[in-house]
Image (tube, helix red, strand yellow):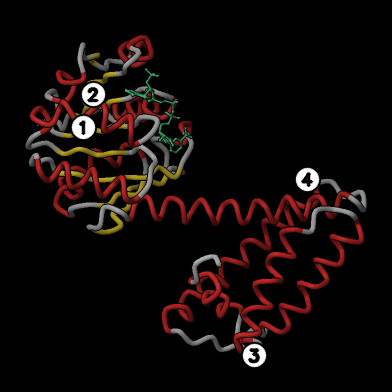
Amino acid sequence: TPKTVTVLGLGLMGQALAAAFLASGTPTTVWNRTPSKAAPLTADGAVLAPTAARAVTAAPLVVVCLTDHDAVRELLAPLADSLRGRTLVNLTSGHSDGARALARWAGEHDIAYLDGAIMAIPTAIGTEHASLLYAGPQDAFDAHHATLAALGPATHLGTDHALASLYDVALLGVMWGALNSFLHGAALLETAGVKATAFAPLANAWAGSVTEFVTAYAEQIDTGTYPAHDATLDTHRATLDHLVHESEATGVNAELPRFVRALTDRAIAAGHGADSYAAMIEQFRKPTT
Ligand code: NDP
């Protein structure tokens, strides 16, 4: 029997999700508050349900992707009985406490619940460039993995429902950290007449090297020892000074390097000057004072 799926929410992302299910040959029922957004999908074979309740009962697997968790709660609260015995996959971005609350609610109504995060833009959905993260019961993931794979490579993070949202923001943080540093560097080089398009290939090659640091430092973070096989924090601190100095001398924004230098100062004051850069983890573990 073919697996079937229901998609609730046909915004930019929901439409891409439903289209990918259809493209994989999965019979797909859709519902959206504004039904007109379903037109391109019904033209490709999707069934438009007249109500959210009818959509939910059309398939054992229900994928929801709305603006935020408030919208999800508002939509699903009256549908608990219709969802009973089915698997609900929430691909709406949100906080981990929201995911845990939704998981509790689902548990009370015999709904198998997976919280998810989409690390992709809509045009990447259905390709190998999309990464979809899921958290919740292993058996629910295993039962629907083959269907969900139509959206893109799927990773089960663990049974704790909080994990999808936590990984989501942690990975976005990596993205913003890299992008902000690239933008700062581009502004710095612009003062010497260098185009961003000239900087980009070297920045990308260097970002590739940084992945090796990430791998090595992850090991050190987990073991709690930070041997400086490559460079000491004292050395990093001195070089960071150059970045602050160049930023100030060229008149570009120096806040980002000043902030990083302040963090290294605190780590060195805590006795980590001879350790590797990974020792900075202890500054990140502390709450902001
Ligand atoms: P859109 O704004 O395009 O779509 C929002 C959807 O939510 C629409 O279907 C809208 O219905 C529906 N909606 C909002 N409020 C309600 C409500 N109270 N009741 C019922 N339906 C409601 O957003 P996206 O599709 O881009 O994003 C959806 C989710 O996916 C977000 O959480 C976003 O963070 C996440 N995401 C998006 C990515 C992207 O690149 N777009 C990337 C990764 C994650 P209607 O059409 O009637 O307004």
Query: Quick one: label 3, few (<14), some, or many (20+) residues within 10 Å?
Result: some
Nearer the observer: mark 1 or 3; the answer is 3
Which amino acid lies under the numbered mark 1 shown in the image of this protein? Val
Q: Which mark is residue 62?
A: 1
Q: Quadrant of ligand 1?
A: top left
Q: Secondary structure at mark 3?
A: loop
Q: Nearer the viewer's eye, disc 3 or disc 4?
A: 3
Q: Secondary structure at mark 4?
A: helix
Q: Nearer the viewer, mark 2 or mark 3?
A: 3
Q: Is residue 4 left or right of residue 97?
A: left
Mark 4, Cα crowd under 10 Å, few <14 / some 14-19 / many 20+, is: few
Viewer-side residue, 220 vs 142: 220
Q: Amino acid at mark 2?
A: Thr
Check residue 197 in the rendering and tell me which mark sits there, or answer none. Answer: 4
Q: Earlier in the sequence, mark 1 or mark 4?
A: 1
Q: Nearer the viewer, mark 1 or mark 2?
A: 1
The first of marks 1 and 3 along the sequence is 1
- N-terminal of the pair, mark 2 or mark 3, is 2
User: Could you say which quadrant of the image residue 132 lies in?
Assistant: top left
Q: Are marks 4 and 2 in contact (CB under 8 Å)?
A: no
- How far apart are labels 1 and 4 at the CA level? 44 Å
